[in-house]
Image (tube, grey):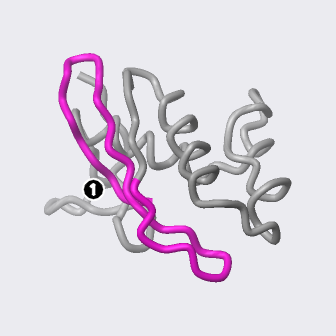
Amino acid sequence: MASTLLLDQVGWDLCLDVAGNIALATEPYATAQDAAASVRTFQGEVYYDVGRGIPYFDQILGHLPPLSLVKAYVEAAAALTPNVVAARAFITGFKGRKLTGQVQITDTAGRLTAAGF
């Protein structure tokens, strides 16, 4: 069973558990959160794989692309997450420079889980 650091859904920062320790997210939410983190990754930001991420600077910010293109980028980035077999994006806001939404993933165990971005 994989786990990852649990991030606050509003501030996207570390959370504490009831004992005051850094909280962990476990499956299946851990995979969904990792997929949402992939959506927040700018292309070139991952130093060991500069091809990963979404080309926000080159093709999205300041360019006003169609939402279908943004959705395709989001789904492709989420699908690169380990243990994700399918990803579906729901864009809830694209105002100014802020993109918000939800990514729903299906993992290798067949579970459907969602996380916001």
Query: Which secondary structure class fits the magenta region best?
Result: strand
Residue 24 sits in quarter: top left
In the image, residue 68 lies at what x, y percent? 57, 52
Q: In this view, does 100 lie to the left or right of 44?
A: left
Q: Which residue lies furthest to the bottom in this view?
A: 96
In the image, residue 59 lies at what x, y percent? 80, 55
Q: Which residue is under mark 1?
A: 21
Q: Does the magenta stretch include residue 108?
A: yes
Q: Give the range drawn in magenta.
A: 90-117
Q: Nearer the viewer, residue 16 or 89?
A: 89
**Residue 95, placed above or below residue 62:** below
- Give the quarter of the figure containing the C terminus: bottom left
**Residue 34, placed above or below residue 103:** above
Q: Which of 24 and 64 is in front in this view?
A: 64
Q: Which residue lies furthest to the top in this view?
A: 108
- Give the quarter of the figure containing the N terminus: top left
Q: Which residue is drawn at 76% across and 67% down?
A: 61
In the image, residue 95 lies at what x, y percent? 58, 81
Q: What element carries label 1?
A: loop
Q: Residue at x 82, y 58 (%)?
A: 57
Q: Which of 54 and 49 is in front in this view?
A: 54
In the image, residue 109 lies at what x, y percent? 20, 18
**Residue 108, placed above or below residue 16:** above
Amino acid bearing label 1: Asn
